[in-house]
Image (tube, rainbow, N blue to C red):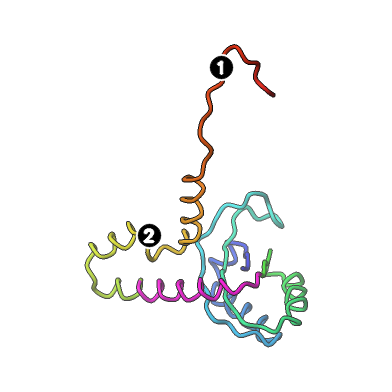
């Protein structure tokens, strides 16, 4: 995931996409999927910027090239922050995001609105709420400890 200044992203988004592709290409990386997230207010200022644009990328690269790629990103004037993760589950998430993007393009071409609301109600096609997170939150709710009432004659432990 790359973080860019939102002002720079609004002025030259294709240039930033090309910059990321060039960074990956220099280190034998292959871009699999990428998506731009909307501008967001940052929790704190980074290099004088209060808003940022996140660019989520899925790519393949040799493990030994990640340190050099991180160094190039740190030296880049365009990239404010970068985060790399390696996990086999991410490949599945990438495929889901690709399918959701493809489905979104197809919906825009002529499917009815009732199909769109039905998919969102069931949680399908929403990249911001993965099924694993929903399952984990449902499990946490189901396994919450029962509420115990304190009797007035016993002192409370603090």
Vertical position of residue 155 compared to residue 7: above or below? above
Give the Cα separation between the discs numbered 1 and 2: 43 Å
Residue 89 occupies quadrant: bottom right
Quickly name the residue at label 2.
123
Residue range highlighted in magenta = 85-103
Residue 151: assigned label: 1
The picture places residue 64, in percent across and down from the top left corner, at 76, 82
Examine the image and state in which quarter residue 62 appears: bottom right
Q: Position of residue 132 (x, y in %)?
A: 49, 61
Image coordinates of residue 136 in percent, x first then y, are 51, 54
93 to the left or right of 48 = left
Q: Give SS at disc 2.
A: loop
Give me the residue at 47% from left, 61% from top: 130
Quadrant including the C terminus = top right
Q: Main secondary structure of the magenta part?
A: helix
Residue under the point 68% across and 67% down: 82
């Amino acid at each position: 995931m790359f973080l860019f200044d939102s002002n720079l992203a609004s002025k030259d988004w294709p240039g930033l996409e090309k910059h990321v592709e060039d960074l990956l290409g220099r280190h034998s990386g292959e871009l699999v999927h990428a998506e731009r997230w909307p501008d967001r207010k940052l929790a704190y200022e980074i290099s004088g910027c209060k808003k940022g644009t996140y660019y989520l990328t899925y790519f393949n690269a040799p493990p030994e090239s990640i340190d050099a790629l991180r160094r190039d990103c740190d030296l880049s004037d365009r990239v404010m922050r970068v985060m790399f993760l390696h996990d086999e589950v991410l490949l599945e998430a990438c495929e889901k995001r690709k399918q959701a993007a493809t489905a979104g393009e197809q919906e825009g071409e002529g499917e009815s609105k009732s199909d769109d609301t039905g998919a969102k109600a069931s949680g399908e096609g929403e990249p911001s709420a993965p099924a694993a997170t929903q399952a984990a939150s449902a499990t946490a709710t189901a396994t919450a400890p029962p509420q115990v009432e304190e009797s007035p004659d016993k002192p409370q432990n603090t």
